[in-house]
Image (spheres, grey):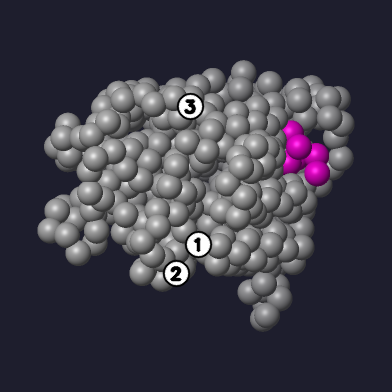
């Protein structure tokens, strides 16, 4: 776990408002080194890791069924993946804080190539379904590590006024992986008549994931990072695993408002099952599914940009921005699911067996592809909003690693459940209804959290995890303030 963050902490002025405390500011390097060590560059590098690894995984998922005719194997592999993911992610923040974000990111990226190799093997040997399931379970462990490290870096490196823009930078690069992957699949399968992608597609994806797994080797050590305002991200220390687990408990106990985000966490991957398998995978042929997937991930970039503009607006109170972002996502949920219902009511698992799959040249394709584009917009707006809300609760990379772990753990537990429901043949309409209901519930639960917890600035008294000593005890705010060079009298007591 890192030392207390050195982002400008916030103390109480005479009128009770939050004012910046005088913390030490360092001179940022200039020239090529300044560019390479810039927080935006480092977040962009994380984005390229996710471009090559989870981005290409998303591309295969977005095609539906991992690019296979029979989507059952992919659904069961996702059950295995998200089951191990949900367990690993809960503790991944502790692993991240002990090993460091760069090494954790490196280890987490290794599972994606194995998973894609599983589908390549399945294309060659149709009886290799067990290998795909094992690869999915291993990927779940790796993904828990990768996303905890990613969340910690992405939310901790920017200053408070730029958090949404950094999320957008990451999200845009990350989702280009889905765009490029789907474009490769579309190009290679444009003239295909089969229902699954060809071996060449999987080989290209496999090579790219190996490249992505090498990128963390060239990243700057987070311990040396300076934000754009010259403040340090963290001060290094080497606590025990015991202290890390205590920190996990303290983060949850002392900031219980994060529990109100748990339904929103769960919904954030729940809707993929209906979107990818019950809509894209069920209605379209392989080349059209590939095109849809490309447009879906391209729309993600636009959706994240829209949220970044809203959530980082200058001269608008942070809580007001949070309400605006919430309202936009809430409206999108009803527009998309109302639209989706008009299609879903017309087909079932049984009826699609005798249905001619829709091609991109067909007249009925237009309305459905625009719905799929709007689904991509909603996904990125949802995820950007969640990350921004967590980032509004802390600037401490250790605490944010825990929050990212909670997020991915709950998200993956929900995904495991709904993918299993898909694998056992739950009616399409049931999956659709649960998706709509959980999305609404997640937003309604988040509303009181915005009112009660989102403040203009994160204060030192909020950073309880950062105030843990090496024995696992929470230090008083004034003691930590002395270490940071802040006048004890100016600091709000914990």
Residue at figure coordinates x 71%, y 52% from the top left: 110
Q: Are marks 3 and 1 in contact (CB under 8 Å)?
A: no
Q: Are marks 2 and 1 in contact (CB under 8 Å)?
A: yes
In front of the other: 485 or 177: 177
Q: Residue furthest bottom?
A: 31
Q: How many marks?
A: 3
Indicate the position of residue 41 as horizontal and vertical percent values.
60, 67
Q: Is residue 455 visible?
A: no
The span picked out in magenta is: 93-99
Magenta span: chief secondary structure = helix
- Disc 3 from disc 1: Cα separation: 26 Å
- The residue singled out by tag 1 in the image is 198
Q: Is residue 74 visible?
A: yes
Please check the rendered image and state whether residue 94 is part of the magenta-colored stretch, yes or no: yes
Horizontal relation, residue 130 to residue 391: left or right = right
- The residue singled out by tag 2 in the image is 188
Report the quarter where the C terminus lies.
top right
Residue at figure coordinates x 22%, y 49% from the top left: 356
Q: Quadrant of residue 425?
A: top left
The kind of secondary structure element at disc 2 is helix
- The residue singled out by tag 3 in the image is 420
Q: Earlier in the sequence, mark 2 or mark 1?
A: 2
Q: Earlier in the sequence, mark 2 or mark 3?
A: 2
């Amino acid at each position: 776990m890192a030392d207390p963050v050195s982002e400008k902490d916030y103390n109480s002025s005479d009128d009770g408002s939050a004012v910046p405390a005088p913390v030490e500011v360092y001179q940022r390097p200039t020239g090529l080194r300044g560019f390479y060590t810039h927080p935006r560059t480092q977040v962009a590098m994380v984005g390229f890791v996710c471009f090559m690894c989870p981005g290409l995984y998303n591309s295969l998922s977005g095609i539906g069924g991992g690019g296979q005719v029979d989507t059952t194997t992919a659904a069961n592999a996702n059950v295995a993946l998200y089951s191990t993911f949900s367990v690993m992610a809960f503790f991944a923040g502790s692993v991240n804080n002990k090993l460091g974000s760069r090494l954790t990111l490196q280890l987490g990226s290794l599972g994606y190539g194995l998973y894609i190799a599983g589908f390549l093997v399945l294309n060659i040997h149709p009886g290799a379904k067990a290998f795909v399931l094992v690869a999915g379970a291993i990927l779940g462990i790796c993904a828990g590590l990768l996303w905890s490290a990613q969340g910690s870096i992405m939310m901790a490196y920017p200053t408070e006024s730029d958090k949404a823009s950094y999320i957008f930078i990451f999200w845009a690069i990350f989702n280009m992986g889905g765009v490029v992957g789907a474009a490769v699949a579309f190009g290679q399968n444009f003239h295909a008549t089969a229902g699954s992608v060809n071996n060449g597609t999987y080989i290209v994806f496999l090579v790219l994931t190996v490249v992505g797994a090498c990128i963390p080797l060239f990243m700057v050590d987070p311990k040396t990072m300076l934000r754009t305002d010259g403040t340090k991200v963290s001060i290094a220390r080497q606590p025990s695993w015991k202290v890390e687990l205590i920190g996990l408990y303290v983060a949850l106990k002392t900031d219980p408002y994060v529990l109100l985000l748990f339904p929103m966490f769960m919904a954030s991957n729940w809707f993929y099952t209906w979107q990818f398998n019950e809509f894209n995978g069920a209605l379209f042929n392989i080349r059209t599914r590939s095109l849809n997937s490309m447009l879906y991930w391209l729309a993600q970039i636009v959706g994240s940009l829209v949220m970044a503009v809203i959530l980082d607006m200058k001269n608008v109170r942070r809580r007001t921005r949070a309400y605006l972002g919430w309202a936009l996502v809430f409206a999108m949920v009803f527009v998309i699911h109302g639209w989706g219902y008009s299609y879903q009511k017309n087909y079932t698992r049984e009826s699609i067996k005798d249905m001619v799959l829709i091609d991109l040249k067909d007249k009925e394709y237009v309305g459905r592809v625009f719905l799929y584009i709007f689904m991509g917009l909603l996904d990125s707006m949802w995820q950007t909003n969640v990350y921004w809300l967590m980032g509004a609760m802390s600037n401490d990379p250790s605490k944010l690693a825990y929050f990212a772990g909670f997020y991915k753990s709950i998200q993956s537990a929900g995904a495991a459940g709904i993918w299993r429901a898909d694998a056992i043949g739950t009616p399409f309409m049931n999956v659709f209804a649960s998706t709509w209901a959980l999305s609404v519930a997640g937003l309604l639960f988040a509303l009181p959290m915005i009112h009660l917890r989102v403040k203009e600035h994160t204060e030192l008294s909020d950073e309880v995890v950062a105030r843990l000593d090496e024995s696992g005890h929470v230090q008083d705010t004034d003691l930590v303030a002395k270490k940071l060079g802040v006048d004890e009298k100016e600091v709000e007591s914990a």
